[in-house]
Amino acid sequence: QSALTQPPSASGSPGQSVTISCTGTSSDVGNYNFVSWYQQHPGRAPKLIIYEVIKRPSGVPDRFSGSKSGNTASLTVSGLQAEDEADYYCSSYAGTNKFVVFGGGTKLTVL
Amino acid sequence: EVQLVDSGGGLVQPGGSLRLSCAASGFTFSSYAMIWVRQAPGKGLEWVSTISGSGGSAYHADSVKGRFTISRDNSKNALYLQMNSLRAEDTAVYYCAKGDTSGVNLVYWGQGTLVTVSS
């Protein structure tokens, strides 16, 4: 069982927006602004798309945005495109004992 | 260009050992924390170990503590994961990743190397 809770699936039509939640606790998501989101296409390594809750690495489209409220972080994908279909994982720093914890992943389907 | 090349995976019997390697290039290796993350077949990501840039600090997940050891050789730009007392549940693709300055955000990932623990 993963430390962070994500919905197993999400979907949307091209052009629509979809939001994926990531719920942790006051020991991880709620206590640190070190929430990241990773995109993983089948057979590929994960790719960082959001870090420190809201920041985007260079080259990541601004269609991807992050937010956090309390113990829950969210990833919003706006203007869905076919290539956005992938698995998405959230992660959070959880202190020097557990260091990094991941969510179980959400499979995003573009209808 | 940052490159991380994972190697060393393979088939090993339960109780056996394996050493994974990650060859890094394209950045000042000793300046960044490095991380191992694994993914069991069809499952999600699991953090395994983190080591500081100097190698002076290392952290391991409870699931591997006492069995796995992360290390690095900054003179060779290489990261390692020594895995002992392997169990079937250690079967996974193992990825090395480069941390950013915080050491928490995994900015670049290797291609992964598959470890299968089976008799």
Image: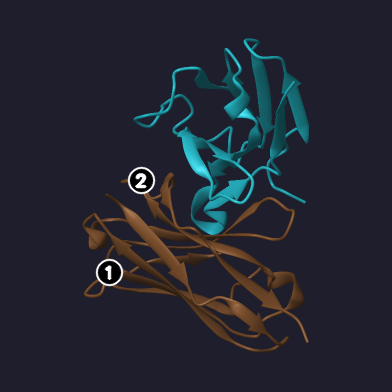
Drawn side of residue A101 relative to residue B88, left or right: left
Drawn side of residue B90 relative to residue B94, left or right: right
Amino acid beneath label 2: Ser
x, y percent for residue A19: 66, 20
Badge 2 density bin: few <14, some 14–19, many ≥20, Cα 10 Å? few
Residue B58 found in image quarter = bottom left
In the depicted structure, whether residue A67 falls above or below residue B30 = above
In front of the other: A91 or B115 = B115
x, y percent for residue A6: 72, 35
In the depicted structure, whether residue B89 falls above or below residue A107 = below
Chain identifier, colour brown: B
- Write the residue at 44% across / 22% down: A61
Amino acid beneath label 1: Asn
The answer to whether mark 2 and mark 1 are in CB contact below 8 A is no
Residue B55 found in image quarter = bottom left
- For label 1, the SS is loop
Report whether residue A32 is seen.
no
- Write the residue at 27% across / 66% down: B54
In the depicted structure, whether residue A45 falls above or below residue A57 = below
In front of the other: B69 or A109 = A109
Drawn side of residue B94 relative to residue B108, left or right: right
- Write the residue at 78% across / 87% down: B119
- Write the residue at 71% across / 87% down: B13
Q: Chain of mark 1?
A: B
- Mark 2 vs mark 1: same chain? yes
Q: Nearer the viewer, mark 2 or mark 1?
A: 1
User: Which residue does the numbered mark 1 point to in the structure image?
Assistant: B77
In front of the other: B71 or A108 = A108
In the depicted structure, whether residue B83 falls above or below residue B28 = below
> How much space separates mark 2 and mark 1, taking CA atoms?
19 Å
Which numbered disc covers residue B102? 2
